[in-house]
């Protein structure tokens, strides 16, 4: 290190501000395991390939953040805003995403195995398999599921299965109509 150089290295687990993370990443650090960044504002940040496993990112703002190939396994992302984030190839194994906003996020090839996905907002997100979660405006007719009358988990599951079957039938009908429209007239 030449005279005047300043080291911004912060020991793993001691990252406590968004600026520490951004500065460390800019200087080539990629290992931020167990960082404590609850409510941090990291919107529009480029954090490709970063290790944020076991990090506390609850209620963090990660809108439009580039997290391609990031390791977020076991991370607490509960209530985080990941709207429009690029999570292609990210590892989210056992991450807590409960209540997170993933609208318009790209999760192509992301690993969500054993992640807590309760209450996640998916509108317009690209799923790991490349399919797109519908936005409320794109579902026609609207799919409504009433669970207030369900008295048990089994009844709620059966209600959901019936609604899913109806939705699949509507999709099949729409696909058939599209095929008809695309069939050349002889």
Image (cartoon, rainbow, N blue to C red):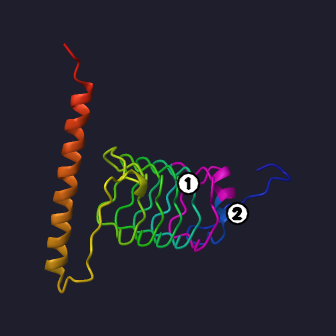
Residue that mark 1 sits on: 30
- The magenta stretch is 22-48
Q: How many residues crowd around disc 1 within 10 Å: few (fewer than 14), some, or many (20 or more)?
A: some
At x 41%, y 59%, the residue is 122
Q: Is mark 2 on a helix, strand or loop?
A: helix
Toward the viewer: 6 or 3?
Answer: 6
The image shows residue 60, relative to residue 111, as above or below, that is: below
Residue that mark 2 sits on: 19
Q: Where is residue 97 in the image (x, y as percent from the top left)?
A: 42, 68
Q: Which residue lies furthest to the top in this view?
A: 186
* SS majority, magenta: loop
Q: Which residue lies furthest to the right in this view?
A: 4
Q: How many residues crowd around disc 2 within 10 Å: few (fewer than 14), some, or many (20 or more)?
A: few
At x 53%, y 58%, the residue is 31
All told, the count of numbered labels is 2
Q: How far apart are marks 2 and 1 (CA)?
A: 14 Å
Please indicate whether residue 93 sits to the left or right of residue 167 in the image.
right
Q: Is mark 1 on a helix, strand or loop?
A: loop
Look at discs 2 and 1 and give the one toward the viewer.
2
Q: Residue furthest bottom?
A: 151
At x 42%, y 54%, the residue is 137
The image shows residue 115, relative to residue 84, as above or below, that is: below
Contact (Cβ within 8 Å) of mark 2 with mark 1: no
**Position of the C terminus by quadrant:** top left
Q: Where is residue 164 in the image (x, y as percent from the top left)?
A: 20, 60
Q: Which mark is residue 69?
A: none
Q: Where is residue 48 in the image (x, y as percent from the top left)?
A: 53, 48
Toward the viewer: 179 or 83?
Answer: 179
**Magenta span includes 26:** yes
Q: Position of residue 123 (x, y in %)?
A: 42, 57
At x 60%, y 54%, the residue is 29
Please indicate whether residue 92 sits to the left or right of residue 44 in the image.
left
């Amino acid at each position: 290190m030449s005279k005047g150089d300043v080291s911004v290295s912060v020991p793993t687990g001691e990252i406590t501000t968004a600026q520490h993370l951004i500065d460390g990443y800019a200087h080539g650090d990629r290992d931020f395991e167990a960082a404590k960044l609850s409510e941090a504002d990291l919107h529009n940040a480029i954090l490709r390939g970063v290790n944020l496993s076991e990090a506390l990112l609850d209620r963090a703002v990660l809108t439009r953040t580039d997290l391609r190939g990031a390791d977020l396994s076991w991370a607490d992302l509960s209530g985080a805003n990941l709207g429009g984030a690029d999570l292609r190839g990210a590892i989210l194994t056992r991450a807590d995403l409960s209540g997170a906003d993933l609208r318009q996020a790209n999760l192509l090839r992301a690993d969500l195995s054993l992640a807590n996905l309760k209450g996640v907002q998916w509108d317009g997100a690209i799923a790991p398999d490349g399919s797109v979660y519908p936005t409320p405006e794109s579902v026609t007719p609207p799919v409504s599921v009433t669970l207030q009358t369900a008295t048990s988990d089994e009844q709620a599951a059966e209600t959901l299965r019936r609604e899913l079957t109806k939705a699949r039938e509507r999709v099949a009908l729409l696909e058939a109509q599209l095929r008809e429209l695309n069939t050349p007239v002889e």
